[in-house]
Image: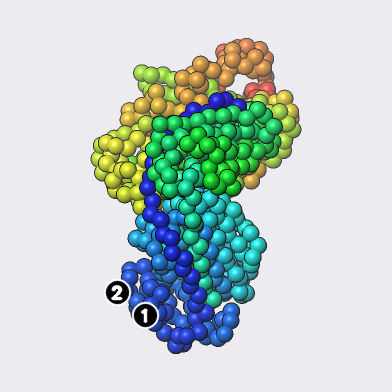
């Protein structure tokens, strides 16, 4: 493991609440039907006292109870959720010591539930943990303002009382969620503080269902303060990816907190991966005040294939052992993932400049492109803004389960949120692929005409309806005008880090936005051309397809990238390849020169557009069996002909007088190879 690079990143002072406090409410002391916020000095609502006793408040009910006869009833008033928004404050922010919260939850059949913990006394500042019960009987949680994916996903029984417990040891930053006393998640929380619970009926979207009706009962919490020692440095967290590509390196950081009354001036640290040699490091000439934090970057660590453990330990503070060595070490399980040979994962993001949450899609797609350039390809499919490609947008919005923005589709078989794209990547990248894809291209800069060939070298026998396709994307798009302003819900840092968007206004001005991975074109109605490839393909076979388009004057050619795709029989993406335009041009269009197994040069089609007749010009270097089909964009065959064996320079005329205006695909069969040209018919 490489030597650690240490530097002081931040010293943040925090408040310290020493008083122990407890709370317990069995909901039995209130009148049936009364508003709990208006009846109790402990409960309130999101908007404060003004909202108590209104529809924002929750009512006491005898419809269900865990103990006694009463509980609190929560119900969403509409598909937009709420207006009930019940809050239980915990007596101020707690960011050290141990806080334990318990309540019993009863969710009615086919309904959903939601509650979150606020990290600051000012409600709406920081979401520490979000908790969801879905209509199909699952519980999952996310780390609120930390903008991460689910930290657990477990079964949750409807029509039954379930015990929910949150234990937050904020001294050690060790949090745990239990369902019915069974641990379902243990985690370090980037928002390591807690101040209140917000109980908000929510349905639709991630939680599903037609409504949210649920009950809570027997609510309690206990806060146990932490006693500061004289000299105490606590290792709070190791912040590194727990999964990464095997034999590749990724860095991270270690966070230390001064849990003593004496300022920390120096720290010695030792880290070790598995049974490898320990690496020591030190930081000095710092002044970390009591309860402040010290973040130390860690040089990239190479991940071995499979499982290993990383353990870091504080060996001394201010030149001596500290007073509490029980909090001096942390461990993290690492796993090195080995990608399947030749595999590239493909992600399609639903986005739009009007969408206030879509900045997270941009952030996570950019991160994937930087981190996994050889193994991942992604495209931003815009909706209702100047970058929209209608055929692509229309297809994406009909994907099964699609419900809103931002969303991502991985390999056309998984619909999820951009937050989970990296975790999903490790599951997709190990799935074997039967094909190696390569892009080749030819570009006429004067006419701005682009031809792209997607070549598939098949490494396994396959059968079924497989289809090629191609996506053209552009990076670094920046234009003036209101249509290129980005709506930004992360402005003001109210939802925590989001790749710099937390520092930008809402909306982000067009001159401060650069859009990446933007779809500029997709072919064959976004689903590929049916029947182009044979239904049975043998290992060792090579097929390719050629697409043509004229690049708009507004497209910046150096920023163009090409994504070649192969769809499987269920429409899933079985593999992808991504290249810059320059890389594809270097490969060249696939012809007899670049692919010796072919017996013909790239065919030419002229005139195109056609009014009455167009000609296919072929150069056959040896005798070949030639056939042709003309199909429309729905896959319907318009005309078909078998020319028998031909050789040399050949012209094949196509009479287009009876064709309707529109686009057609010319499919040429030359021996066992297929190539295509796009024909436009335009009767004057």
Q: Residue furthest bottom?
A: 31
Q: Residue furthest left?
A: 481
Rendered view: 71 above or below 261: below
Q: Residue at x 40, y 49 (%)?
A: 496
Nearer to the camera, 118 or 445: 118
Q: Quadrant of the C terminus?
A: top left
Nearer to the camera, 388 or 231: 231
Query: Residue 3 bears which disc, if any?
Result: none
Mark 2: secondary structure: helix
Mark 1: secondary structure: helix
Is any part of residue 164 visible from this angle? yes
Residue 117 spot, x, y in % from top left: 46, 61
- Within 10 Å of the Cα at label 2, are there few (<14), some (14-19), or many (20+) other Cα atoms? few
Q: Which residue is mark 1?
A: 38
Q: Residue at x 62, y 11 (%)?
A: 621
Rendered view: 114 above or below 615: below
Q: CA distance from mark 1 to mark 2?
A: 10 Å
Is any part of residue 210 visible from this angle? no
Rendered view: 455 above or below 72: above
- Within 10 Å of the Cα at label 1, are there few (<14), some (14-19), or many (20+) other Cα atoms? many
Residue 543 spot, x, y in % from top left: 64, 27
Q: Residue at x 32, y 48 (%)?
A: 491
Q: Residue at x 64, y 33 (%)?
A: 273
Residue 554 spot, x, y in % from top left: 32, 30
Q: Quadrant of the N terminus?
A: top right
Quarter assignment of residue 57: bottom left
Q: Earlier in the sequence, mark 1 or mark 2?
A: 1
Q: How is the image coloured?
A: rainbow
Q: Which residue is mark 2?
A: 50
Nearer to the camera, 118 or 502: 118
Residue 98 spot, x, y in % from top left: 52, 59
């Amino acid at each position: 493991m490489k030597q650690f690079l240490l530097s002081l990143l931040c010293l943040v002072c925090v408040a310290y609440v020493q008083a122990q406090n407890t709370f317990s409410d069995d909901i039995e002391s209130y009148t049936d039907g009364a508003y709990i916020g208006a009846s109790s000095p402990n409960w309130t609502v999101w908007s404060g006292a003004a909202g108590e006793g209104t529809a924002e408040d929750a009512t006491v009910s005898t419809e269900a109870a865990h103990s006694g006869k009463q509980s609190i009833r929560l119900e969403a008033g509409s598909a937009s959720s709420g207006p009930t928004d019940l809050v239980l404050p915990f007596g101020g922010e707690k960011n050290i010591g141990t806080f334990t919260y318990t309540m019993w939850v009863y969710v009615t059949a086919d309904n959903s539930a939601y509650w979150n913990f606020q990290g600051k006394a000012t409600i709406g500042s920081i979401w520490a943990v979000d908790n969801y019960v879905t209509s199909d009987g699952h519980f999952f949680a996310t780390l609120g303002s930390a903008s991460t994916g689910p930290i657990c996903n477990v079964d949750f029984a409807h029509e039954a009382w379930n015990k929910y417990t949150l234990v937050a040891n904020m001294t050690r930053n060790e949090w745990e969620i239990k369902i019915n006393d069974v641990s379902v998640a243990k985690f370090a929380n980037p928002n390591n503080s807690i101040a209140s619970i917000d109980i908000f009926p929510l349905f639709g979207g991630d939680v599903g269902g037609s409504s949210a009706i649920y009950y809570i009962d027997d609510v309690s919490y206990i806060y146990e303060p932490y006693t500061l020692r004289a000299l105490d440095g606590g290792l709070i967290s190791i912040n590194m990816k727990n999964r990464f590509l095997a034999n590749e390196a990724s860095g991270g950081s270690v966070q230390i907190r001064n849990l003593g009354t004496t300022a920390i001036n120096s720290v010695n640290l030792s880290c070790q991966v598995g049974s490898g040699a320990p690496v020591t490091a030190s930081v000095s000439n710092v002044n970390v005040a009591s309860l402040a934090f010290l973040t130390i970057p860690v040089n990239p660590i190479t991940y071995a294939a499979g499982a290993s453990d990383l353990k870091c330990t504080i060996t001394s503070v201010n030149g001596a052992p500290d007073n509490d060595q029980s909090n001096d070490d942390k461990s993290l399980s690492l796993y090195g993932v080995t990608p399947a040979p030749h595999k590239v994962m493909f992600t399609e993001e639903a986005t739009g400049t009007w969408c206030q949450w879509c900045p997270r899609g941009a952030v996570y797609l950019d991160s994937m492109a930087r981190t996994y350039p050889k193994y991942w390809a992604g495209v931003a499919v815009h909706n209702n803004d100047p970058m929209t490609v209608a055929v692509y947008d229309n297809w994406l919005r009909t994907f099964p389960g699609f419900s809103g923005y931002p969303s991502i589709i991985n390999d056309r078989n998984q619909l999820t949120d951009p937050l989970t794209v990296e975790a999903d990547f490790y599951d997709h990248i190990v799935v074997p692929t039967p094909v190696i894809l390569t892009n080749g291209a030819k570009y006429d800069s004067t006419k701005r005409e682009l031809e792209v060939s997607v070549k598939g070298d098949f490494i396994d026998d396959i059968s079924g309806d497989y289809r090629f396709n191609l996506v053209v994307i552009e990076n670094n798009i920046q234009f003036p005008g209101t249509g290129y302003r980005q709506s930004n819900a992360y402005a003001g840092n109210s939802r925590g880090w989001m790749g710099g968007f937390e520092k930008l206004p809402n909306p982000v001005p067009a001159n401060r936005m650069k859009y990446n991975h933007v779809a500029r074109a997709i072919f064959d109605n976004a689903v590929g051309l049916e029947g182009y490839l044979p239904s049975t393909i043998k290992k060792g076979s090579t097929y390719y397809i050629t697409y043509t388009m004229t690049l708009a004057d507004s497209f910046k050619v150096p920023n163009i990238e090409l994504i070649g795709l192969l769809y499987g029989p269920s429409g899933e993406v079985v593999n992808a390849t991504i290249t810059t335009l320059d890389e594809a041009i270097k490969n060249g269009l696939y012809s007899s020169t670049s692919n010796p197994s072919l017996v013909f040069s790239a065919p030419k089609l002229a005139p195109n557009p056609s009014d009455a007749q167009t000609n296919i010009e072929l150069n056959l270097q040896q005798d070949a069996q030639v056939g042709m089909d003309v199909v429309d964009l729905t896959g319907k065959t318009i005309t078909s002909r078998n020319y028998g064996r031909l050789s040399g320079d050949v012209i094949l005329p196509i009479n287009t007088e009876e064709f309707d205006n529109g686009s057609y695909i010319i499919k040429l069969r030359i021996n066992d190879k297929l190539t295509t040209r796009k024909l436009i018919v335009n009767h004057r």
